[in-house]
Image (cartoon, rainbow, N blue to C red):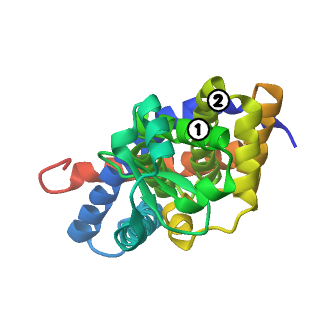
Amino acid sequence: MSELPGRPAAALCWALLPLAVLAHITLAVLAVAEFAAMGWPLPTWFDTGAVILVLATAAAGLAASTAVAVRAAAGSRALRALIRAARRPVPIFMRNEGAGLGCATRLDVVAGDEAFAITYGLIRPRILVSTGLAATLAPAEIRAVLAHEREHLRHRDPLRLLAARLVAAWGCYLPAAGWLARRAALRHELAADRAAAGSAGRGVLAAALLKLAAMPACPAIAAAGSAGDERRSLEARITQLERGRPLRQRLAMSRLLASAATLAVLAAASLCCAAMSQVLPGGVL
């Protein structure tokens, strides 16, 4: 199956998708106004079909974005409940490592047999690690993991990823939207890995990733994480650490063409809605 290089296609899609979402919302409001003013059905079958298409896709986007927001809120509540119930003092070793990385004041520790480290929080993100992490990893591996999370902290990745997931969810009717969301999450992980490997070493970070992948997941952490393909993400991250560069992420031509065709149909319907708005009382909204 033919494919396009991932980076140019993704850059183009991310440049257009937010604008498309805003235009879609505007047109959906316009379509509701047209139904309210003209009644059902509209003057022609094409007009009726166009307005229904705009409203149906907007409803699907709203539902998908709402589902993402609800899952994110539920994950955040589960994480904060875990912190309230199991918070522990930060071990001296971790505090010293955090101080060396400049994140000691934004480091939290909870008791738990599961080994994990995660960056959480949207406005002022923090790093959360478990006591099981210290029991599972060697000191050098813990240092590498903290360096990885420090990069997520510096770039406010939880907020950026949530925004990307919400925008991509609105375009759930486009086959390329899900790929874009998964690729955005992976790119942040790969960038954090590169930064951590530069200070801790690629072999050390790879060993830490493999150990953590073999551990059972903490339910609260799983709920707070993004719904990506963890197996493929791990493969891509290990490949980058082994080869010094990641595998190229590609958007399949079939997904691109299907998305383009859907957008073309939606654009035609949108033009119809915009044209009908001229006959509404007061003209264009």
Q: State the separation of the CA atoms marked 1 and 2.
A: 7 Å
Q: Nearer the viewer, residue 265 or 240?
A: 240
Q: Nearer the viewer, residue 148 or 12?
A: 148
In the rendered structure, are the residues bearing label 1 and label 2 in contact, judged by CB atoms less than 8 Å apart? yes
Question: Which secondary structure lies at badge 2?
Answer: helix
Disc 2 marks which residue? 200
Question: Which secondary structure lies at badge 1?
Answer: helix
Residue at 34 percent of width and 70 percent of height: 84
Q: What is the quadrant of the N terminus in the image?
A: top right
Asked whether the viewer can see residue 19, the reply is no
Disc 1 marks which residue? 143
Asked if 8 appears above or below 14 in the picture, the reply is above
Residue at 36 percent of width and 65 percent of height: 43
Residue at 65 percent of width and 48 percent of height: 179
Q: Where residue 176 appears, x then y in whole percent?
A: 63, 48
Q: Amino acid at mark 1?
A: Arg
Left or right position of 71 against 284:
right
